[in-house]
Image: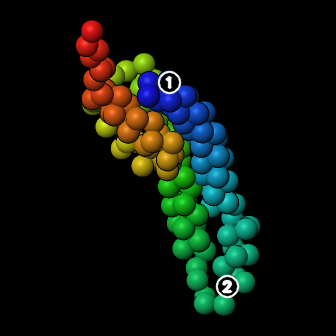
């Protein structure tokens, strides 16, 4: 169980690093779109509902901030993954489950569950 936990935490940490790059780049694109006045004005002019340019700026900025927050969750998840590889603490495993959910990395949740099971599993006593 401990070997499976270590492998899953390593894979989860790598996925979290990729998640950081993905979410951060998407967030930067949305913030850049919100600051592009020509794009926002053209989008507002072409909308059939008469939506204002300010709405699109707020919308794209909100999406950008949301994706940057996802990137921050992945940073915390990466730290927790590599901390959880060598830890048998129940608190660390529970935090790994929480940040696995917040950063949408399912392997982190599975690794933490394996860690909790391995922590509670007692070695069999042999009778001679």
Name which residue lies at 58% across and 79% down: 52
What residue does disc 2 label? 47
User: Can residue 93 be seen?
Assistant: no
Snapshot quadrant of residue 33: bottom right
Spatial separation of the CA atoms under disc 1 and disc 2? 55 Å
Q: Is residue 11 left or right of residue 119?
A: right
Q: Is residue 120 left or right of residue 104?
A: left
Q: Is residue 6 above or below residue 28?
A: above
Name which residue lies at 30% across and 20% down: 123
For label 1, the crowd category at 10 Å Cα-Cα, with few meaning under 14, some 14 to 19 and many 20 or more, is few
Q: Quadrant of the N terminus?
A: top left
What residue does disc 1 label? 3
Residue 72: image location, x then y, percent: 48, 41
Mark 1 or mark 2, whichever is nearer to me = 1
Q: Quadrant of the C terminus?
A: top left
For label 2, the crowd category at 10 Å Cα-Cα, with few meaning under 14, some 14 to 19 and many 20 or more, is few
Q: Nearer the viewer, residue 57 or 116?
A: 116
Counting labels gives: 2
Name which residue lies at 42% across and 19% down: 86
Q: Is residue 43 left or right of residue 12?
A: right
N-term-proximal mark, 1 vs 2 = 1
Which mark is drawn over residue 96? Answer: none
| Disc 1 + disc 2, Cβ < 8 Å | no
């Amino acid at each position: 169980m401990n070997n499976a936990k270590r492998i899953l935490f390593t894979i989860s940490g790598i996925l979290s690093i990729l998640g950081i790059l993905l979410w951060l780049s998407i967030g930067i694109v949305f913030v850049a779109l919100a600051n592009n006045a020509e794009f926002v004005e053209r989008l507002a002019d072409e909308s059939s509902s008469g939506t204002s340019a300010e709405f699109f700026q707020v919308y794209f900025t909100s999406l950008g901030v949301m994706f940057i927050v996802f990137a921050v969750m992945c940073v915390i998840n990466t730290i927790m993954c590599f901390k959880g590889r060598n830890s048998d603490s129940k608190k660390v495993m529970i935090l790994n489950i929480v940040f696995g959910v917040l950063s949408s990395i399912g392997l982190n949740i599975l690794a933490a569950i394996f860690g909790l099971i391995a922590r509670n599993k007692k070695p069999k006593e042999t009778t001679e």
